[in-house]
Amino acid sequence: MPYPAGHREEVREKIVRSARKLFNQFGFDNVSVDRIMADAGLTRGGFYSYFKSKSELYSEVLQCFFTDPNWKNCWEGVHVDMASGDVGPQIVCAYLSRQHFEDVGNSCPMIALPSDVARSGKSAKSAFENVFRTMTSVLEQSLAKDGAPGRVTAQAIAALCVGGMVVARALDDRALADELREAAMAVALELGGWEHPRGASLRLAQKDKPEACPTLEARFAEPSLGI
Protein backbone atom coordinates (compact mmCIF):
# COMPACT_ATOMS: atom_id res chain seq x y z
CA MET A 1 0.00 0.00 0.00
CA PRO A 2 1.26 3.51 -0.76
CA TYR A 3 2.17 5.75 2.14
CA PRO A 4 -0.32 8.52 2.98
CA ALA A 5 0.34 12.05 1.77
CA GLY A 6 2.96 13.81 3.87
CA HIS A 7 4.53 10.58 5.14
CA ARG A 8 7.96 11.28 3.67
CA GLU A 9 8.04 14.80 5.18
CA GLU A 10 7.02 13.43 8.58
CA VAL A 11 9.76 10.79 8.54
CA ARG A 12 12.38 13.32 7.46
CA GLU A 13 11.36 15.67 10.27
CA LYS A 14 11.52 12.79 12.76
CA ILE A 15 15.10 12.07 11.71
CA VAL A 16 16.05 15.76 12.01
CA ARG A 17 14.50 16.02 15.49
CA SER A 18 16.35 12.94 16.73
CA ALA A 19 19.63 14.14 15.22
CA ARG A 20 19.26 17.61 16.74
CA LYS A 21 18.66 16.16 20.19
CA LEU A 22 21.56 13.71 20.01
CA PHE A 23 24.04 16.13 18.42
CA ASN A 24 23.21 18.74 21.05
CA GLN A 25 23.74 16.26 23.87
CA PHE A 26 26.76 14.33 22.62
CA GLY A 27 28.34 16.19 19.69
CA PHE A 28 28.62 15.33 16.02
CA ASP A 29 31.50 12.84 16.27
CA ASN A 30 29.91 10.83 19.08
CA VAL A 31 26.59 10.17 17.36
CA SER A 32 26.28 7.52 14.63
CA VAL A 33 23.66 7.21 11.91
CA ASP A 34 22.51 3.97 13.58
CA ARG A 35 21.92 5.80 16.84
CA ILE A 36 19.98 8.61 15.16
CA MET A 37 17.71 6.20 13.32
CA ALA A 38 17.16 4.04 16.38
CA ASP A 39 16.17 7.11 18.41
CA ALA A 40 13.71 8.03 15.66
CA GLY A 41 12.26 4.50 15.70
CA LEU A 42 13.53 3.80 12.18
CA THR A 43 16.01 1.43 10.53
CA ARG A 44 19.42 2.48 9.23
CA GLY A 45 18.57 1.38 5.71
CA GLY A 46 16.06 4.19 5.29
CA PHE A 47 18.48 6.96 6.20
CA TYR A 48 20.10 7.32 2.78
CA SER A 49 16.80 7.83 1.01
CA TYR A 50 16.56 11.11 2.92
CA PHE A 51 20.16 12.28 3.37
CA LYS A 52 23.37 11.61 1.46
CA SER A 53 25.48 11.61 4.62
CA LYS A 54 25.54 12.45 8.31
CA SER A 55 27.21 15.74 7.38
CA GLU A 56 24.31 16.72 5.14
CA LEU A 57 21.91 15.96 7.97
CA TYR A 58 24.08 18.02 10.32
CA SER A 59 23.73 21.10 8.12
CA GLU A 60 19.95 20.75 8.27
CA VAL A 61 20.02 20.33 12.04
CA LEU A 62 21.75 23.71 12.33
CA GLN A 63 18.51 25.65 12.35
CA CYS A 64 16.49 27.47 15.00
CA PHE A 65 13.12 29.14 15.24
CA PHE A 66 14.53 32.10 13.27
CA THR A 67 15.06 30.05 10.12
CA ASP A 68 12.84 26.96 10.41
CA PRO A 69 9.08 27.47 10.91
CA ASN A 70 8.72 23.77 11.84
CA TRP A 71 11.32 23.96 14.63
CA LYS A 72 9.68 23.37 18.00
CA ASN A 73 11.58 24.69 21.00
CA CYS A 74 9.71 22.47 23.48
CA TRP A 75 10.68 24.85 26.28
CA GLU A 76 7.71 24.73 28.64
CA GLY A 77 6.21 28.17 29.23
CA VAL A 78 8.44 29.83 26.61
CA HIS A 79 6.96 31.13 23.37
CA VAL A 80 8.31 33.38 20.64
CA ASP A 81 5.85 34.94 18.20
CA MET A 82 8.02 35.87 15.22
CA ALA A 83 5.18 37.95 13.75
CA SER A 84 4.63 40.11 16.81
CA GLY A 85 5.76 43.71 17.13
CA ASP A 86 7.76 43.01 20.29
CA VAL A 87 9.65 39.93 19.12
CA GLY A 88 13.00 41.42 20.21
CA PRO A 89 12.51 41.10 23.98
CA GLN A 90 10.76 37.75 23.44
CA ILE A 91 13.90 36.41 21.77
CA VAL A 92 16.15 37.70 24.56
CA CYS A 93 13.99 36.19 27.30
CA ALA A 94 13.54 32.87 25.47
CA TYR A 95 17.22 32.51 24.70
CA LEU A 96 18.34 33.22 28.24
CA SER A 97 15.48 31.42 29.96
CA ARG A 98 15.95 28.75 32.61
CA GLN A 99 14.01 26.34 30.37
CA HIS A 100 16.45 26.77 27.49
CA PHE A 101 19.38 26.44 29.87
CA GLU A 102 18.10 23.11 31.16
CA ASP A 103 16.87 21.62 27.87
CA VAL A 104 20.18 20.76 26.21
CA GLY A 105 18.63 18.37 23.70
CA ASN A 106 16.35 21.06 22.26
CA SER A 107 18.86 23.88 22.30
CA CYS A 108 19.36 26.31 19.50
CA PRO A 109 22.49 24.97 17.72
CA MET A 110 24.31 28.28 18.16
CA ILE A 111 24.46 27.46 21.88
CA ALA A 112 24.96 23.71 21.86
CA LEU A 113 27.21 23.20 18.84
CA PRO A 114 29.61 26.14 18.25
CA SER A 115 32.75 24.05 18.86
CA ASP A 116 31.56 21.31 16.52
CA VAL A 117 30.72 23.85 13.82
CA ALA A 118 34.16 25.47 14.11
CA ARG A 119 35.71 22.12 13.20
CA SER A 120 33.20 21.34 10.45
CA GLY A 121 33.10 22.04 6.75
CA LYS A 122 31.83 25.03 4.82
CA SER A 123 28.19 23.88 4.61
CA ALA A 124 27.86 23.57 8.39
CA LYS A 125 29.51 26.93 8.96
CA SER A 126 27.23 28.54 6.38
CA ALA A 127 24.15 27.06 8.05
CA PHE A 128 25.31 28.25 11.47
CA GLU A 129 26.09 31.71 10.11
CA ASN A 130 22.67 31.89 8.48
CA VAL A 131 20.96 31.37 11.84
CA PHE A 132 23.04 34.12 13.46
CA ARG A 133 22.46 36.53 10.58
CA THR A 134 18.71 35.87 10.71
CA MET A 135 18.61 36.34 14.47
CA THR A 136 20.45 39.65 14.11
CA SER A 137 18.13 40.76 11.32
CA VAL A 138 15.01 40.02 13.37
CA LEU A 139 16.43 41.91 16.35
CA GLU A 140 17.39 44.83 14.10
CA GLN A 141 13.85 45.07 12.72
CA SER A 142 12.44 45.05 16.25
CA LEU A 143 14.83 47.81 17.26
CA ALA A 144 13.90 49.89 14.20
CA LYS A 145 10.27 49.90 15.31
CA ASP A 146 11.36 51.38 18.61
CA GLY A 147 13.51 54.03 16.94
CA ALA A 148 16.70 52.54 18.43
CA PRO A 149 20.03 52.18 16.58
CA GLY A 150 20.01 49.06 14.47
CA ARG A 151 22.68 46.70 13.21
CA VAL A 152 25.45 47.20 15.77
CA THR A 153 23.02 47.03 18.70
CA ALA A 154 21.31 43.94 17.25
CA GLN A 155 24.65 42.16 16.84
CA ALA A 156 25.61 43.00 20.43
CA ILE A 157 22.29 41.71 21.76
CA ALA A 158 22.60 38.50 19.75
CA ALA A 159 26.14 37.98 21.02
CA LEU A 160 24.99 38.52 24.62
CA CYS A 161 22.21 35.95 24.19
CA VAL A 162 24.32 33.27 22.53
CA GLY A 163 27.55 33.89 24.44
CA GLY A 164 25.79 34.30 27.75
CA MET A 165 24.14 30.91 27.45
CA VAL A 166 27.31 29.21 26.19
CA VAL A 167 29.26 30.41 29.23
CA ALA A 168 26.39 29.64 31.64
CA ARG A 169 26.25 26.07 30.33
CA ALA A 170 29.99 25.70 30.91
CA LEU A 171 29.79 26.67 34.59
CA ASP A 172 29.55 23.98 37.27
CA ASP A 173 28.11 26.38 39.86
CA ARG A 174 24.38 26.55 39.08
CA ALA A 175 23.86 29.70 41.15
CA LEU A 176 26.60 31.46 39.22
CA ALA A 177 25.20 30.22 35.92
CA ASP A 178 21.75 31.59 36.81
CA GLU A 179 23.28 34.88 37.88
CA LEU A 180 25.13 35.12 34.57
CA ARG A 181 21.97 34.43 32.55
CA GLU A 182 20.07 37.12 34.44
CA ALA A 183 22.92 39.60 33.96
CA ALA A 184 23.12 38.92 30.23
CA MET A 185 19.35 39.26 29.93
CA ALA A 186 19.33 42.55 31.84
CA VAL A 187 22.05 44.07 29.68
CA ALA A 188 20.54 42.78 26.41
CA LEU A 189 17.13 44.22 27.30
CA GLU A 190 18.80 47.45 28.35
CA LEU A 191 20.58 47.71 25.00
CA GLY A 192 17.30 47.24 23.19
CA GLY A 193 15.44 49.71 25.38
CA TRP A 194 12.99 46.95 26.31
CA GLU A 195 11.29 46.26 29.62
CA HIS A 196 11.79 43.07 31.55
CA PRO A 197 8.75 40.74 31.28
CA ARG A 198 8.26 41.00 35.03
CA GLY A 199 7.19 44.57 34.35
CA ALA A 200 10.02 46.62 35.76
CA SER A 201 12.32 48.46 33.41
CA LEU A 202 15.84 47.14 33.84
CA ARG A 203 17.88 50.29 33.52
CA LEU A 204 21.42 49.62 34.64
CA ALA A 205 22.46 51.36 37.80
CA GLN A 206 25.03 54.03 37.08
CA LYS A 207 27.56 52.39 39.36
CA ASP A 208 27.32 49.17 37.33
CA LYS A 209 27.98 50.84 34.00
CA PRO A 210 31.52 50.47 32.61
CA GLU A 211 33.66 53.56 32.20
CA ALA A 212 33.11 55.11 28.78
CA CYS A 213 35.77 54.71 26.13
CA PRO A 214 36.19 58.10 24.35
CA THR A 215 37.75 56.49 21.27
CA LEU A 216 34.83 54.12 20.73
CA GLU A 217 32.28 56.81 21.51
CA ALA A 218 33.87 59.05 18.90
CA ARG A 219 33.81 56.29 16.28
CA PHE A 220 30.18 55.44 16.79
CA ALA A 221 29.27 59.12 16.67
CA GLU A 222 30.69 59.58 13.19
CA PRO A 223 27.89 60.10 10.63
CA SER A 224 29.91 58.36 7.92
CA LEU A 225 29.50 54.99 9.68
CA GLY A 226 25.78 55.04 8.98
CA ILE A 227 24.90 53.64 12.41
Image (cartoon, rainbow, N blue to C red):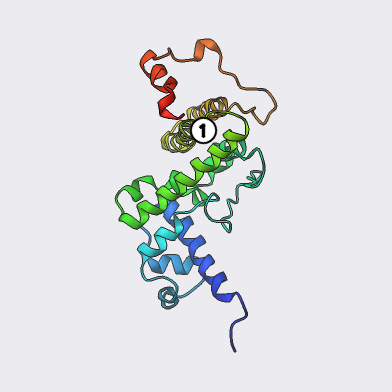
Q: Quadrant of the rendered structure where residue 201 is?
A: top right
82 versus 204 height, above or below: below
Q: Is residue 55 left or right of residue 202?
A: left
Q: Residue furthest right?
A: 199
Residue at 51% in and 60% down: 17
Q: Where's the N terminus, which quadrant? A: bottom right
Q: Quadrant of the rendered structure where residue 54 is?
A: bottom left
Residue 78 visible in the snapshot:
yes
Q: Is residue 31 left or right of residue 96?
A: left
Between residue 213 and residue 174, name the one nearer to us. Answer: 213
Q: Residue furthest bottom?
A: 1
- As helix, strand or loop, the secondary structure at mark 1 comes to loop
Q: Amino acid at mark 1?
A: Gly
Residue at 44% in and 50% down: 130
What percent of the width, then of the height, locates residue 192? 56, 29
Residue 27 visible in the snapshot:
no
Residue topped by disc 1: 150
Between residue 166 and residue 104, name the one nearer to us. Answer: 166
129 versus 159 height, above or below: below
What percent of the width, then of the height, locates residue 83? 65, 47
Q: Is residue 8 left or right of residue 196?
A: left
